[in-house]
Amino acid sequence: MNLIDRIITEFDQGLRTVLAESQSVRPYPDREKSEAPLSEPEKRKAAALMRINHSGEVCAQALYNGQALTARNPATAAALREASREETEHLAWCEKRIRELGSHKSFLNPVFYAGSFALGAVAGALGDKWNLGFLAETENQVGQHIEGHLKRLPEQDEKSRAILEQMRMDEAKHATTAMAQGGAPLPLPVRLAMKLSSKIMTKTTYWI
C-alpha cells in the first residue's frame, strides 16, 4: 500500500472514529453490574466524566494511527495498531455508558482527532524510540486521568466504575509494552506540554 492509499485509509478510519458507532469484541466490563439509582446532578457528573474519557480515547486512537502512519519499524507500527484497536473498544464502552446516562459525546471530537493525528504523525517521524516513548507517556497520562475520575464518580455508579477500571488496566499494559519494545522516556518539557494540552481538552469536554 503506497502513502496516498494509507492516508486515504487513515482518513476513513478517522471518520469512523468520530461519526460511526464503535463496536467491542470483548464483553462490556459493566455487563454484570446493576444500574444504581442516581440523582440528576450525579447523572450529569458521571456523564461528563465518561465524555472526557471518551474524548481521551478519541485522541489516543488518533495519536496511534498517526504514529503508525510514519513509524519506520513494522513491529512498532503493529504495536501501535494493536493499541488503537483496544482504544476502539474503549470508545464503544464509553459511548454506551454515556447514552445510558442520558448524555452525548463531545461535539469537539473531530477537532481533537485531527489535532492528535497530526501530532502522532510528527512523533512517528522522529524515530521509533520516541514514537514508543510517546505512546507510553500518553497511556500513563490517560491512566492518571482515569484514577482521578474513579475518585470523582458517584460512589454507587458501579457500571461506570467497572468500565474505567478495565480501561486503566489496558492503558497500563500498553505503556509497559511500549517501553519493553524500546521506548525512551520523553523530556520533561514534552511531558508538561502534553499535560497542558490534556488539561485543555478535559476542561472543554466536561461541558461540550
Image (cartoon, rainbow, N blue to C red):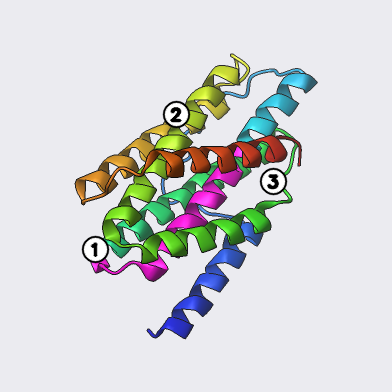
- Between 27 and 45, the residue placed more toward the observer is 45
Question: Magenta region: which residues?
Answer: 52-74
Residue drawn at (49%, 44%) of the image: 90
| Tag 2 residue | 165
Quadrant housing the N terminus: bottom left
Which of these two is toward me, 95 or 206?
Answer: 206
Q: Is residue 160 visible?
A: yes
Give the position of the C terminus as an image quadrant: top right
Q: Quadrant of residue 174?
A: top left
In screen coordinates, is 64 left or right of 206? left
Residue at (38, 52) in percent of width and height: 83
Question: Any mark on residue 105, and which?
Answer: 3
Whichever of callouts 1 and 2 sits on the residue coming sooner in the sequence is 1
Residue 108: percent from left, percent from top = 71, 51
Amino acid type of the residue that numbered disc 1 sits on in the rendered structure: Ala
Give me the disc on residue 83: none
Three-letter amino acid code at disc 3?
Lys
SS at mark 3 in the image: loop
